[in-house]
Image (cartoon, helix red, strand yellow):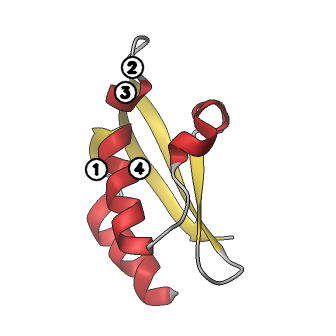
Amino acid sequence: MEEIIKELKEELLNKEMTLVEMDNEAERITGSTTSLFDAENDCMEQTSCAYNMDTDKNIVVEFEIINKNEEDNTETLVKVTDIWED
């Protein structure tokens, strides 16, 4: 789990990207069975997403919204601010 969090931090932390780019990279690294778009409204309200692992653990990716795209959330620009195991 520590290696996964380390890689996530190297690839995502303090970087600006669209929500879909963040989600795709987090899914690739974690092998998650969930996507932020499974609970899109909650993620946008909480400005964080939980990625379910094969274990009983989740990894949370927290972000701030830089530029919200009202027409298409996938194109909303975000900056990842924190990543941790839940």
Q: Earlier in the sequence, mark 2 or mark 4?
A: 2
- For the residues marked 1 and 3, what is the alpha-carbon distance in whole angstroms? 14 Å
User: Dot 1 corresponds to which residue?
Assistant: 15
Label 1 residue SS: loop
Disc 1 crowd rating (10 Å Cα; few below 14, some 14-19, many 20+) is: some
Q: Nearer the viewer, mark 3 or mark 2?
A: 2
Label 4 residue SS: strand
Q: Give the quadrant of residue 40.
A: top right
Q: Earlier in the sequence, mark 1 or mark 3?
A: 1
What amino acid type should be assigned to the residue bearing mark 1? Lys
Vertical relation: 4 (above or below) 63: below
Q: Residue at x 58, y 75 (%)?
A: 53
Label 2 residue SS: loop
- For the residues marked 3 and 2, what is the alpha-carbon distance in whole angstroms? 7 Å
What is the x, y in percent for residue 77?
33, 31
What is the x, y in percent for residue 24?
34, 54
User: Dot 2 corresponds to which residue?
Assistant: 72
What amino acid type should be assigned to the residue bearing mark 2? Asp
Q: Nearer the viewer, mark 2 or mark 1?
A: 2
